[in-house]
Amino acid sequence: MTDPAVTVSEAGEAAVLEVLRGPGGPAGVDRGDGDLVGNGDDAAVLGAASATVVTTDMLVQDTHFRLDLTSWSEIGRRAVAQNVSDVLAMGADCTRVVVAVAVPPGTTMGQIADLADGIHGEAARSGAVVVGGDFTSATVVVVGVTAIGSLPPGARPLRIDTARPGDRIALTGDPGRSAAGLALMLAGHPDGTLQRTHRVPVTPVGSGTAARLGGANALTDVSDGLVRDLSGMMRASGTAADLTTATLPVDPLLDEAAVTLGTVGRAARVLDWVLDGGEDHGLLGTFPAGATIPPEFTVIGVVREGRPGEVTLDGVPRVPGGWDSARGPN
């Protein structure tokens, strides 16, 4: 095994790729997943699928994470998790992951090993295997992931433009936890449940499939903020949405975080986290009357006719906050 203190520039590309490749046999060995060629060759050759779901996203140092707040293993887990979430949002299950990594030359092989542990660990939690990737040097750390999933024969993918008036709006998890965790870390409180949620979101594996089987009309993941992502779904569907404050799931830890931060107007701050926080990577769907809403989903509102993209909270229009990839936080 390569000395973990050796830098990537000293070890060389082949050694780095060997660590990132993780456990498993040669590329051509049948590992039972049906792929003709797996990790380690020029490209993976995947087994047949009825409908293939593909998404890609990346994490960039000092834009999406800070090395002083996030471990290398957590970077790997988070990079995979946010892509798995997009596959789940199509009503599919994630099966394979491809990862491209760029790091500064002074990065140690121990750090690369931790990154690989996170990547493979999160892929395994999601029911996927890592089938390939790439490596190069850069001035900052960048981890790009392509996640691949599949739908069974005849299954309809859940799109964002198929919400219909009268649908009930429902989501998984407790929005705002990631935003509150980041606020705590930036204020000098590095450890805790919310902080861990920000570093490594726990994607609702299986919930996308459950929503599809339950008859959902539309589905997306909450990555940029609940209101922003809901507004995007409504705009794409030509509809509007009404939310109700009383039905929003609010983790009690959010109020504790607001107390810790000494925030004036704690209730408003907590509501902002819930509605605009982002990076929770839960699933947000709409379900028609008669649909079976899975138990992990909480009903928070209804779809109606109206100005496409409009979202109201208790009847009052709510301007989306959250994250804009071109502009940053709003």
Image: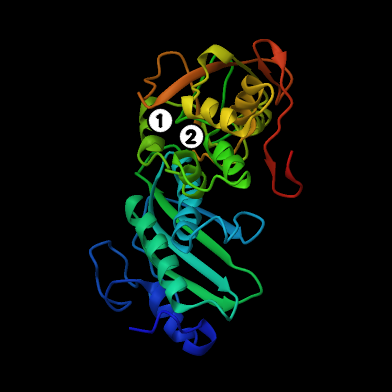
Q: Position of residue 29 (x, y in %)?
A: 26, 75
Q: Taking 264 as reference, is 16 left or right?
A: left
> Which residue sits at x=24%, y=67%?
31
First in residue order: circle 2 vs circle 1: 1
Q: Are marks 2 and 1 in contact (CB under 8 Å)?
A: yes
Find the residue positioned furthest to the right.
327
Q: Secondary structure at mark 2?
A: strand
Q: Nearer the viewer, residue 310 or 110?
A: 110
Q: Taking 76 as reference, is 260 left or right?
A: right
Say which amino acid is labelled 1.
Answer: Ala
Q: Is residue 251 visible?
A: no
Query: Mark 2, residues whose alpha carbon is within 10 Å: few (<14), some, or many (≥20)?
Result: many
- For the N terminus, the image quarter is bottom left
Q: Nearer the viewer, residue 76 or 240?
A: 76
Q: Nearer the viewer, residue 233 or 171?
A: 171
> Which residue sits at x=46%, y=49%?
200
> Which residue sits at x=39%, y=84%?
3
* Spatial CA span between label 2 and label 1: 9 Å
Q: Position of residue 162 (x, y in %)?
A: 56, 29
Q: Which residue is mark 2?
A: 283
Q: Position of residue 172 (x, y in %)?
A: 45, 30
Q: Is residue 51 above or below residue 218?
A: below
Say which amino acid is labelled 2.
Answer: Leu
Q: Which residue is mark 1?
A: 211
* Dot in front, 2 or 1: 2
Query: Mark 1, residues whose alpha carbon is within 10 Å: few (<14), some, or many (≥20)?
Result: many
Q: Which of the 4 quarters of the picture holds residue 73? A: bottom left
Q: Taking 79 as reference, is 215 left or right?
A: left
Q: Secondary structure at mark 1?
A: helix
> Which residue sits at x=57%, y=32%?
260
